[in-house]
Structure formats: C-alpha cells, structure tokens
Image: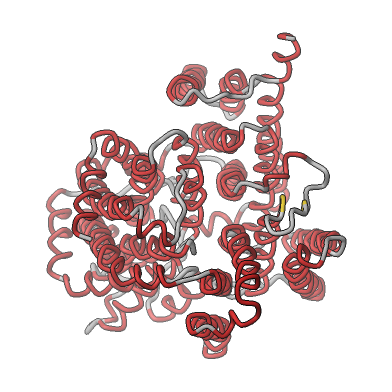
C-alpha cells in the first residue's frame, strides 16, 4: 500500500519537474539558467526515485537521520519500542485510507466554508460541526466555537484591524 | 558592543515586548508538551499575529515561544515515553525508565534544569559569537553571499538523513517555488501560469503553514483519540529538587553538551534531533558506567536536554548574520523578517545590533521563565497531553488558514497552503524530509540574485576571490562528508 502510494507520488514529482523543465526552456537564457539547472537535476533524481521504488520488491523503510542515529545508540543501550510507534504500525491500511479521505474532507470543507461565508461565520460553524461529528458535547463544542471566534475577532479585527475575507455569498448579497 | 548589549536588554525588558514574550512562553510550553505539534508549527501559527508589531516586539513574541518548546517536550517523554518534539526522543531512552523506577520527579527536575541552563549557555554563546562573526559578515560581498547560499543548499544533504535523493528532490521543489514570480534581473515572469496572484512570488509563510500546520491536522485526524493514553507517573516535589541538583552535580556534562548543541545549531541543516542524539551519544561514550544508560541514568536526561535548548542560540547566528537558516525553525523565522521589515545580513550586525542583542536576552529570559513555569505547573502541564485531537484541530486549522490569508489578504494564499498541506502530508508519509524544501525557498532567491550580481560586478573572476575559494572548499567538504559518513557506517 505504502509502496504503491509512494510510486504514484514519485511519478507526480517526475511529471512536475518535467513540466517545469519544459517551461524553463521557453525563457530567455539569463532567466532560465538556474531554473533549468535545478529542474534538470531534480528531474533526474525523481526519475531515479520513481524507478527505484517501482523495481523494489518490498518496502524497506529508509531511516531518517534521527532514526539512524537512534538505531546506533539503541545498539549500545537496550530499550523497548516506543508505544506510540507500535500503535501507529497497527492501524489497518483500509482504515488509514478512510481517515485520510476524512481528513482531506474536513480541510477542504473548511476552506470552502471560508470562501463562501468568510472567516467569522466559517470558524464557529466548522468548529461546532467538526466537534459534534467527533462526538464532543454541545456545551464544549459551542464554548470552543465561541472562544475561538472571539479570539480571532479580538486579535485580527479589533487589535490589528485586519481585513478578513467576508465570504463570497455575503459579498453577492451586499452588492 | 556593550552599549548595544545594554540597549538590547532595555528593548527586551520594555513592558510591551516583555509582556508579549510572557504571553507566548506558555504557548511554547504547551506546543512542546503536545506530541506531534513542535516549534515549527508554533512559529507558523504565531507569525500572523506579528503584523503591525515593532521588530523587537515581534521577535520577542516568536522567540519567546520557540525558545521554550524544547523545555516542555521532555515532560511527555518522561511520563508517557512519547516525546513532545523530535529532539526529546533521546530523553525517552533514560527518562521513561527513571519514571518507571519511581524517579519521575527527579527526571523532570533534571530535564527542566538542564534545559534552562542549556538555553542560557546558548544565548551566552550567541552573544560571544557576534563580535567574531561581525567583521566576517561586513567583509562579505555578493560573491561570498552567493557561496554562503550554495553552502547552505549543500546542507540539504545533511538534512536528508539516509535518503539524500529525497532531500535533493525536496530542496528542488523549494528552489522552484522560490523562482515563481518576476525575475528581478530580467523582468521575466516565471512559472506564473498567467495568474496575477503569482506575480509577486509565493510567500514562505503560506508554504510553511501548509507543510507543517495542515499536514499535522491531516495526521491528527487520521490518528484520532488523545495523544496520551496511560496514567502518568507521580511527580514528587523532593525528586524534582534532586533532579535540579543533579544538573549542577554533573555541571561538566551539562556544559559540554550545551556547547555541542550550540555548535550543531550553528551548522545549518543538522538541527535539534542531531544535537540531542549526539549529546546523548557523547554522554554514553564519556561515562565511566555506560551500562547504566537506557536503564534510567540521570546523565541520559541531562545530556540531550541541555543540547536541545542551547542549539537555538547557535542556530540564530547564521540566520541573522548570513540569512542562511541554522534550522527549519529559523527558516520559518526568516519568513517573519519580511513581515517585521528587517533584512538579515550585514545590516543586522550594524544598524540592528540592538535588536540582535534583544534576541539574545529574550532567549535567555524565556528559558529561565519557561523552566520556572514548568516547575510550578508540571503536574497540570502533563494533563495537556490528554486533550483530544478533536478539540485541538479547529484551533490549528483556524490559525493556520488565517495566518496564510493575512500574508497578502488574498484567498489564493489559502489555496497555496491547502496544496502544500497535502504535499507536506505526502512527504511525511513517504519519508521525504520537509526542512530542505524550506531551505530551498529561503536560499533560492538569495543564490540567484547574488550570482547575477557577482557576474555583473566581477564576471567569472568572482570565483577567484579568497573568501569565495574558502567557502567553495567548505561546499566541497559538505558534499563529501555525508558520502564518507555513509560509507563509514
């Protein structure tokens, strides 16, 4: 599952760098020098990563700098696996995918709400809907929504006199 | 220099500046305590609040928070074996076994005192380094700054762990983002796709918020529940005092590890994770009883915690002096420089020297105040890890998207944050380091502009200047070093 996802991600990166490389060629020599160099090197790297991932039989997790360092220390001192890490590994991939779609739905939903209704309406609305969906009580949900909206209003409208997005619906009604 | 130091203290103690710092210290502690959030996210969320602030107030506001994130992070590491931030993972190795032995208070006292001492040593080192770095920076011209930017870019290899290629690809994405907009040298519009929004380029703050805040929200929704599930061990006051004393009994180790942290902080790309693990490794190697480590040795808590906090002072040096961020946190902080109307580089060490010293004072004061707050409220602070993610998410998402929108007041900023958020999550899942991407954005523009300036002023002869040659050798060394290290491993 991770391997398939990573292959797709690497392929997207290959396409991205290829497009950037192609666009760079259309600029004059001075403007394209560095972008061409950067996108060219990155394109080669991403192709190598894509092919490497495609040809790899099974996922072998690459250790980050921290993990590699931790591993070398762990060899000297015996310690148990961190429970949180154990828990992360146990989550089934189908459930993980469902939760990923759910997370994207919430983030995208909030952005759409802001676009349509503006910050000061979208914030309490999103907070209440999100918290209620996650089975939080009405009192807590409403308190968080009110507190968060009040904080935003005080800090960004009253104190710094920021111009917050009003929302496209209100702009249409206003016009 | 002493005048500037005094003026810096006055700036830091100004009631408005000091008040803002006091306001963000608890925020930093809370962010540090909640595993998975971290200082980068904290900075990304707080930057929008700095609009309209004076530079001194703005930096006190941001640094006050950032300085103490590492102070809070050992609390869940010791109590639940879950580090609040990456660098505190090293504290788990001995901190949690200490808690299991009934020495949670001692481990906590040692971690907090070592953090405070480390932070203050880091600030002192920063103050002592300024007079050394100042003449070097003032002697730099565009060729040297170009080479510094190239040197900074080569540190991508150090930030990439074992996957150099992934680091380079991440750095490449960052560099390409930095090219978006009008090229100042030729006036050509690059990668704007005909959209007016892209003409001024993509603001680093919008990308940072996406990479860290939105990506973290996605991770938290997937994880669900609360951060900690187990009942924390009891923290006894007598034990806390014993741990506090341990810090001064092992003063030699704390001092050495603080210096290690400071030096590592100065090297762009190595960051806090490396600082704490290298310090831990140093403690194991230099101990007369290395067999005690991993089973609850107090030195195993003192070493990473002192290095953790001292690295911030070191990381500020290249950030302020050369505009080359010492860590991913400092790269985000650079995003705030434009908002606060300050340019890193020579100007920082001439016209704004008072401001630099006010940062030194803020670092030192925030560390001391952070430790005192932790010691007073350690029991309550541990409860923060039980907050359910369903309560945290609306707050992170609101301040993240709001912060992104306020950079230009354009809805396009939110869309950039959304896209980079999804990118950040994918990078996290597929082990692509995110720090090189930020480094690419920060250094891309500097590298390109100074290269064109150098070529216009000196032609290719700029490569023969003594400063350029020295930096070029460092560039070569920083490319070869990870390869040699990997082979050695």
Task: Residue at 68%, 25% (x, y): give it.
Answer: A113
Nearest to the observer: residue B155 or residue B193? B193
Name which residue lies at 30% across and 72% down.
Answer: B132
Residue at image x 46%, y 26%? A160
**The image quarter in which residue B444 lies:** bottom right
Q: Is residue B472 above or below residue B239?
A: below
Direction from residue B63 to residue A88 in the image, left or right: right
Residue ID at (23%, 67%): B298
Q: Which residue is nearer to you in this view: B176 or B160?
A: B176
Residue in the foreground of this view, choosing between B287 and B452: B452
Judge whether A82 appears above or below B484 on screen. Answer: above
Q: Is residue B299 above or below residue B1?
A: below
Q: Residue furthest front?
A: B457
Q: Is A90 positioned to the left or the right of B348 in the image?
A: right
Quadrant of the rendering where the N terminus of chain B is positioned: bottom left
Is residue A128 visible in the rendered image? The answer is yes
Residue B205 place in picture, x, y as percent? 56, 46
Q: Position of residue B427 (x, y in %)?
A: 65, 58
Q: Quadrant of residue B379?
A: top left
Report if residue B481 is visible in the image. Answer: no
């Amino acid at each position: 599952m991770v391997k398939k996802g990573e292959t797709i991600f690497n392929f997207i990166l290959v396409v991205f760098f290829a497009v950037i490389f192609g666009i760079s060629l259309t600029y004059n020599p001075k403007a394209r020098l560095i972008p061409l160099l950067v996108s060219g090197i990155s394109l080669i790297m991403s192709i190598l990563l894509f092919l490497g991932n495609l040809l790899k039989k099974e996922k072998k997790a690459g250790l980050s700098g921290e993990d590699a360092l931790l591993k070398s220390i762990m060899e000297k001192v015996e310690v148990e696996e961190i429970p949180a890490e154990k828990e992360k590994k146990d989550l089934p991939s189908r459930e993980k995918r469902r939760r990923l779609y759910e997370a994207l739905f919430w983030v995208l939903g909030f952005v759409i709400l802001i676009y349509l209704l503006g910050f000061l309406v979208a914030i309490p609305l999103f907070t209440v809907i999100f918290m209620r969906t996650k089975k939080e009580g009405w009192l807590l949900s409403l308190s968080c929504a009110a507190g968060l909206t009040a904080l935003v209003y005080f800090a960004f409208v009253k104190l710094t006199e920021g111009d917050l997005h009003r929302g496209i619906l209100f702009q249409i009604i206003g016009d | 220099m002493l005048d500037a130091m005094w003026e810096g203290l006055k700036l830091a103690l100004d009631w408005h500046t000091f008040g803002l710092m006091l306001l963000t210290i608890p925020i930093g502690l809370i962010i540090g305590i909640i595993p998975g959030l971290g200082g980068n996210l904290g900075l990304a969320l707080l930057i929008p609040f700095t609009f309209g602030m004076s530079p001194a107030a703005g930096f006190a506001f941001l640094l006050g928070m950032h300085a103490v994130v590492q102070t809070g992070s050992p609390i869940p590491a010791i109590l639940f074996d879950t580090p609040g931030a990456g660098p505190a993972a090293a504290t788990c190795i001995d901190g949690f076994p200490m808690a299991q032995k009934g020495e949670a208070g001692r481990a906590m006292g040692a971690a907090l005192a070592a953090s405070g001492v480390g932070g203050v040593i880091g600030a002192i080192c920063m103050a002592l380094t300024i007079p050394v770095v100042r003449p070097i920076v003032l002697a730099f011209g565009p060729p040297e700054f170009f080479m510094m930017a190239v040197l900074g870019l080569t540190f991508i290899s150090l930030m990439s762990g074992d996957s150099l290629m992934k680091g380079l690809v991440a750095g490449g994405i960052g560099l390409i983002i930095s090219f978006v907009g009008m090229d100042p040298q030729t006036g050509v519009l690059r990668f704007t796709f005909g959209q007016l929004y892209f003409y001024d380029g993509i603001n680093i703050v919008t990308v940072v918020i996406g990479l860290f805040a939105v990506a973290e929200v996605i991770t938290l929704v997937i994880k669900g529940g609360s951060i900690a599930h187990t009942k924390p061990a009891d923290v006894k006051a007598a034990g806390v005092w014993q741990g506090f004393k341990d810090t001064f009994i092992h003063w030699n180790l704390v001092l050495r590890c603080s210096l290690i942290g400071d030096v590592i902080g100065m090297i762009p790309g190595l960051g806090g994770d490396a600082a704490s693990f290298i310090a831990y490794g140093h403690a194991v190697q230099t101990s007369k009883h290395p067999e005690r480590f991993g089973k609850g040795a107090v030195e195993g808590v003192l070493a990473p915690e002192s290095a953790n906090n001292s690295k911030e002072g070191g990381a500020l040096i290249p950030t302020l002096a050369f505009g080359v961020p010492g860590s991913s946190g400092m790269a985000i902080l650079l995003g705030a420089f434009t908002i606060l109307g300050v340019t890193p580089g020579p100007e920082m060490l001439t016209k704004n020297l008072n401001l630099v010293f006010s940062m030194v004072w803020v670092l030192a004061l925030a560390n001391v105040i952070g430790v005192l707050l932790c010691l007073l409220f350690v029991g309550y602070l541990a409860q923060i890890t039980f907050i359910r993610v369903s309560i945290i998410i609306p707050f992170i998402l609101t301040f993240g998207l709001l912060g992104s929108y306020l950079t230009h007041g354009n809805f396009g900023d939110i869309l950039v944050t959304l896209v980079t958020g999804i990118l950040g999550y994918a990078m996290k899942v597929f082990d692509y380091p995110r720090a090189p991407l930020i480094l690419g954005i920060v250094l891309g523009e500097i590298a390109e502009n100074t290269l064109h300036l150098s070529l216009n002023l000196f032609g290719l002869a700029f490569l023969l200047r003594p400063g350029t040659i020295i930096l070029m050798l460092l560039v070569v060394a920083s490319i070869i070093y990870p390869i040699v290290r990997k082979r050695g491993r």
